[in-house]
Image (cartoon, rainbow, N blue to C red):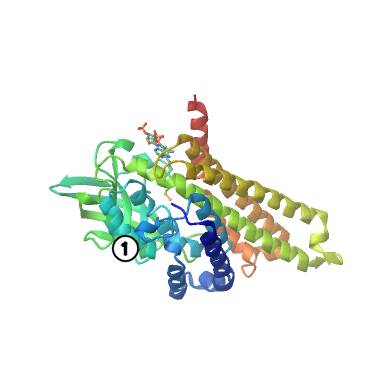
Amino acid sequence: MSVDKETFVILKDSVTRFVRERLMPAEDTVEEHDVVPDDIVSDMKELGLFGLSIPDEYGGIGLTMAQECEIAFELGQTALAFRSVIGTNVGIGSQGILMDGTEEQKRTYLSRIASGDLIVSFALTEPDSGSDAASIKTRAEKVGDDYVLTGSKRFITNAPRAGAFTLMARTDGPGPGGISAFIVPADLPGISLGKPDQKMGQRGTKTCDVLLDQVRVPSGNVIGGTPGHGFKTAMKVLDRGRLHVSALACGMARRILDESIAYAKQRRQFGQRIGDFQLVQAMLADSQAELIAGWSMVQSVARRYDKKPTGTFDANVSMEASCAKMFTTEMVGRVADRGVQVHGGAGYINEYKVERFYRDVRLLRLYEGTTQIQQLVIGRHLMNAA
Ligand code: COS
């Protein structure tokens, strides 16, 4: 699945223009009101952004991972809340269905996910199970033709907007093999939402708990039809998501660097532009070099990701996706820190964008696997490789 080069160039240009002309001017509104305006969400639907990763036979655009990363880079150059609106449909919410779902599940859900008419969230994390994903406790008991789900899910991105969840629950004994992935419509009796999470940054993104009390889900909603594969589905989805987040981190690094350069050209001290001082140039240079390193890594890993058959697990590519996630999200943290430093006191003031981007990028080192989990994936792979 891919779009031809010419169509992709047109799409990318439209996204670049959309980011500059529509999203950047709305950043302050999002920060102030903690919400992405509905008219922007409608425009995102019209541009096809909800369906970037879904093949055209299911109503999406069908980008390759490398192409998706280029679009994520563009979207990363504005407040991350905008990308978050489409993030779960493009990535962790839809990909389990696409990779491991039955044909009927794909036909039932993917076109509505691609159009943005159905928002889908990914529900793995629980109050007592974050990094240790194989320890989830949410139970799914087989009762007749249904499963009855009880438990709670935590920090679920887009849950307040979601029409469905791809949700991991325990159908069998302990460990990864006892976990199954379900498609759970959000309006089933027994589902309720916690209060919206108040976060450090990324205002406009919506996360909350999802509580399940005896929720009856038809057994036909087990992704792929066979229980016990949910952990592997979740891990494959996260490998892919980690690359997308890496591209986003690079986009945000680009934006912070652009803001920093603009400030360094305009701000004068000691009778000259601060950017004419070599110590300021050194900070800009370090950020530029790290950005090139990170973006090169993302592009090359994404190209390797595209070479493996859709939905398959390749331990080497998985390890490389973790390298990209670890490096780029740590990198953008350093770029944001330097961005604040270049701005001096102004960098601590909310009206300058770097203050909020500094807070926004902090999440990138946490979600879809902390830096320490990426280190663990990489380290284990190195120790286990023949
Ligand atoms: N793709 C497919 N299968 C995978 C996989 C991947 N990326 N990673 C592991 N697996 C498979 C393993 O091959 C193993 O299969 P077998 O039982 O057939 O041998 C099985 O899954 C269990 O793997 P493992 O033993 O490595 O599981 P662990 O419990 O040790 O957990 C980590 C591995 C820590 C890597 C995993 O729990 C993890 O990624 N945690 C972070 C979760 C996360 O990112 N949360 C963010 C929330 S979503 S925003």
Name the outermost residue toward the top: 386
Residue that mark 1 sits on: 163
Quarter-of-image position of residue 86? bottom left
- For this rendering, which residue is in front, 305 or 22? 305
Q: Residue at x 32, y 43 (%)?
A: 230
Classify mark 1: helix, strand or loop. loop
> Looking at numbered disc 1 in the image, what kind of residue is underneath it?
Gly
Asked whether residue 142 appears in the rendered view, the answer is yes
| Residue at the extreme bottom of the image, as rendered | 39
Residue 368 position (above or below residue 8): above
Image spot of residue 152 (x, y percent): 31, 52
Q: Residue furthest right?
A: 271
Left or right? Give the position of 355 relative to 212.
Answer: right
Pointer 1 local density, CA inside 10 Å: few below 14, some 14–19, many at least 20: some
Q: Could you tell me residue 317's position as x and y percent?
A: 49, 39
> How far from the left and from the top, in percent, is residue 9?
56, 61
Residue 251 quadrant: bottom right
Residue at the far left: name it. Answer: 144
- Whether residue 202 is visible here, answered yes or no, is no
At horizontal 38% and vertical 42% (from top left) the residue drawn is: 133
Residue name at image x 79 percent, y 61 percent: 275
The number of discs equals 1
Residue 187 left/right relative to 290: left
**View quadrant of ligand 1:** top left
Location of residue 163 in the rendering, given as x and y in whole percent from the top left corner: 31, 63
Q: Is residue 256 above or below residue 368?
A: below
Q: Nearer the viewer, residue 299 or 351?
A: 299
